[in-house]
Image: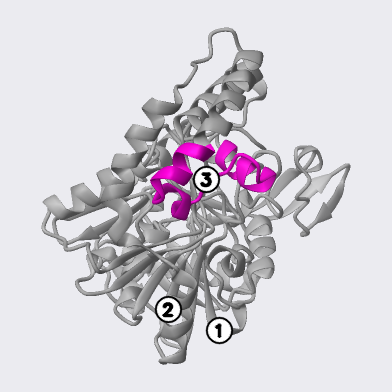
Amino acid sequence: MGSTCVVGLQWGDEAKGKVVDLLTEEHDLVVRYNGGANAGHTVVVGSEVYKLSLIPSGITWPGLQCVIGNGTVIHPSKLLSEIDELVSRGLGIEGRLLISDRAHVIFPYHIEEERVVEAAAGTKKIGTTGRGIGPCYADKANRLHSIRMHDLLDEKRLRDRLSVIVPRKNQLLAALSSSAKQFDVDEIAEEYGKYANRLRPYVDDTFWVLQKALAAGKRILFEGAQGTLLDVDHGSYPFVTSSNSSACGLPSGCGISLRHVNRVIGIVKAYTSRVGSGPFPTELDNEIGEHIRQEGREFGTVTGRPRRCGWLDLVACRYAALLNGVTEVSVMLLDVLSKLDELKICVAYEKDGVQTTEFPVITHELEQYKPVFKSFPGWKQDLRSCRKPSDLPKEAKAYLDTIAEYLKVPVRLASIGPARAETIVFAD
C-alpha cells in the first residue's frame, strides 16, 4: 500500500475529516497541503467531537506524525488556540506536529483588507470566512509583502520586514476605506514575536521530512481542504477559495510528486451544499432544502453560517472526479436523506433545449444552465444502525449504484452517521 490523497468533489464541507480519520490507522503521516483557518474538519471519536481548522485530522490518533505543508497559510493565534484546545483534552501535540518553514503567515492587516474589500463589494461579495486567507495568498504571489514561517522565527528579520510592509498596508487600507484600521509595526512585532517563541518547536523543513519518510517506505495520507469546485484555477471562479483545493495543489503544497500517490479518494456528500456566493444549479431554496440543512446540521464549522443545500449534482462531481484522477469514492451523510419520500440526482444540464453532461466551469456560463434530474424513491428508514452493505435498504443501494455508474469509479465507503462505527465499507 502506497500513499493516499483525500479530496472533496463538491464545494467543500463533504465530511473529509471523517474519512481522513478512518484512513489514518493505515498510514504513518498525515499532510495538509492547502488552505488555512478557513477550513473546518470535524472528527468524532467516541463521545469526543474535535473541530479542526489548520491541524490535520489525523492528530486524534496517538503517535501519528502530522504535517502542515508550505501550501497552507498560517494564522498563528488561531493555530495556537487549536493546539491549546487539543492539549487541554489530553492529546499530545509536541513532537507529532510539524509546520513547513515555507508556509506563509497571516497578519492583522490581511484580515482588515479582506473585511474592507468584502464590505465594498456589497451584493457582489465572494462570501469569504473573513480570516485574511485571500490577501495572504495575494501577498505570496506578489512576493514583496509576504512573510513566511522562517521569517517569523527570526526576530530581526521579522521586524525589518514589517517596517517595510506595514506602512504600505496602511496606505492601501486608507485608500480602500476611510474607516479602515491602521496598524503599528512595534505592536505587531511584539505580538507575533510571542507567537514565534511558542511555534518554534513545530517549524521544520518539511520537504525533507516527507522525502525521508517516502524513502523509508512510510505511507502518507494527504488531506485537502475545501473542495474541488472551490479550486482557484479549476473551480467556479471567482467564487472560489484562494488555493488549489483539488489534488492539483498537492505537489506544490508540500513538495511531493503525484507519482507517489496511488490512491485518490473523492469525497461526495449524498446531496450538495455550498457556503457563500456563486452558482449552485441544484440549490433547493424551499422546505426540502431547509429540511436537509437541519438534518445534516449544515452550518459552517468555522463561521457557523447556514449552508445552502440542494440535490446531488453528478455533472459537477464527474468533472471533479476526472480532474483529480479519482480511483474511488466515499459517499457521506447518506443518513441525512432518510426521511424524504422522493430523492433527485442531477444527471445533465440543459440550456436552450440542448442537454450536456460536461460541467461548464465558467461562472457566467454555469448560471445559464438548468439541472436535469433523475428521481429515486426514498428509503424512509434510519440507516445509522447499518454496519454492512446488506443492511442497507434497496433504495439506498440503488442511489449509491447510480453514483458509481455515473462517475465510473467504485463507491468504497458510505457514511451513515458522524461516528467512526457509523460507516459501511464495500469490498473491492
Q: Is residue 85 above or below residue 2?
A: above
| Label 2 SS | strand
Amino acid residing under circle 1: His
Q: Secondary structure at mark 3?
A: loop
Quarter of the rendering containing residue 78: top left
Q: Residue at x 58, y 39 (%)?
A: 134
Q: Position of residue 173 (x, y in %)?
A: 59, 19
The answer to which of marks 3 and 1 sits earlier in the sequence is 3
Q: Earlier in the sequence, mark 2 or mark 3?
A: 3
Q: Main secondary structure of the magenta part?
A: helix
* Residue designated by label 2: 220
Q: Residue at x 56, y 49 (%)?
A: 11
| Alpha carbon separation for disc pair 3 and 1 | 30 Å
Q: Which residue is mark 1?
A: 260
Query: Marks 2 and 3: CB-CB under 8 Å?
Result: no
The answer to which of 271 and 105 lies nearer the viewer is: 105
Which residue type does callout 3 highlight?
Ile
The magenta span reads 135-161
